[in-house]
């Protein structure tokens, strides 16, 4: 993934937050990027190919450097079968013995943001690639350039919300903070809708699985 440093957002942010030191603004930008990616799951990447093995149910997923996994959207098995996350409730209802039964993999449960459990336990060896939603770590110095290209305004509003929410600073502005918060959350919702529509178009090519 190509990336850009957080300071590329500075001109747009500081235009509406004069007097904020650059390090403070960059931290607000980083936090806004994290919140945007975590809440919208918009920023995605593919994991490196990995192997699933008989009798091994749990798998850790490694994100690119400087990012952390905030969601697993799908997993492609053996380059020809795509499976999707199951909630714990539907897993228990459809496959009560999913933690002990072996067989064909039908889906996965995301126990933590960075790990999955196959449903059911694999009975053979194969490969998989996961579609990961990622966000920058709190110590990251850069972000995927797609965020800058497509969501500059979102990040600007998020950073301004955080900056103007600070107490007892020359740039503090509670009323302005509330306005920027509303704008940021609206754009997060729009990005989420965009992602869901994109996923729906892709999943139309996948035959639905019936619960029996």
Image (cartoon, rainbow, N blue to C red):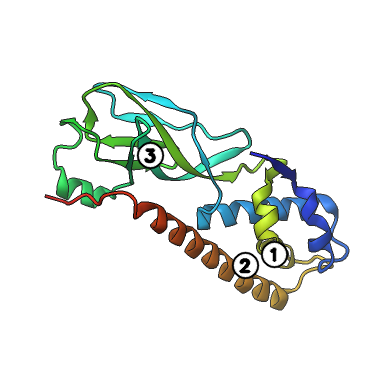
Q: CA distance from mark 1 to mark 3?
A: 31 Å
Determine which residue is flagged by label 3: 75
Q: CA distance from mark 1 to mark 2?
A: 8 Å
Q: Position of residue 46 (x, y in %)?
A: 50, 38
Quadrant occupied by the N terminus: top right
SS label for mark 3: strand
Residue 79 to residue 36: above or below: above
Q: Quadrant of residue 67?
A: top right
Determine which residue is flagged by label 2: 184
The residue nearer to you, when weighing 67 against 131, is 131
Label 2 Cα neighbours within 10 Å, binned few <14 / some 14-19 / many ≥20: many
Q: Nearer the viewer, mark 1 or mark 2?
A: 1
User: If you read the primary sequence from the N terminus, does the residue marked by circle 1 or circle 3 appear first?
Assistant: 3
Point 18% across, 30% down: residue: 103
12 left or right, relative to 175: right
SS label for mark 1: helix
Label 3 Cα neighbours within 10 Å, binned few <14 / some 14-19 / many ≥20: many
Label 1 Cα neighbours within 10 Å, binned few <14 / some 14-19 / many ≥20: some
Tag of residue 153: 1
Cβ–Cβ under 8 Å for marks 2 and 3: no
User: If you read the primary sequence from the N terminus, does the residue marked by circle 2 or circle 3 appear first?
Assistant: 3
Q: CA distance from mark 2 to mark 3?
A: 30 Å
User: If you read the primary sequence from the N terminus, does the residue marked by circle 1 or circle 2 appear first?
Assistant: 1
45 left or right, relative to 156: left
């Amino acid at each position: 993934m190509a990336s850009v440093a957080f300071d590329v957002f500075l001109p747009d942010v500081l235009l509406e937050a004069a007097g904020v030191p650059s390090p403070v603004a960059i931290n607000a930008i980083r936090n806004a990027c994290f919140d945007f990616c975590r809440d919208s799951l918009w920023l995605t990447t593919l994991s490196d190919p990995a192997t699933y093995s008989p009798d091994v149910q749990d798998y850790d997923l490694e994100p690119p450097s400087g990012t952390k996994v905030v969601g697993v959207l799908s997993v492609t098995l053996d380059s020809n079968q795509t499976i999707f996350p199951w909630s714990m409730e539907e897993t228990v209802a459809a496959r009560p013995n999913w933690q002990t039964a072996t067989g064909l993999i039908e889906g996965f449960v995301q126990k933590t943001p960075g790990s999955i459990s196959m449903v059911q336990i694999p009975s053979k060896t194969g490969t998989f690639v996961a579609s990961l939603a990622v966000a920058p770590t709190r110590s990251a110095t850069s972000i995927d350039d797609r965020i800058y290209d497509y969501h500059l305004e979102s990040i600007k509003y998020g950073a301004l919300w955080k900056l103007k929410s600070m107490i007892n600073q020359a740039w503090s502005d509670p009323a302005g903070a509330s306005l920027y918060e509303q704008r940021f959350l609206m754009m997060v919702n729009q990005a989420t809708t965009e992602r869901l529509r994109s996923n729906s178009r892709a999943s139309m090519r996948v035959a639905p699985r019936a619960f029996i």
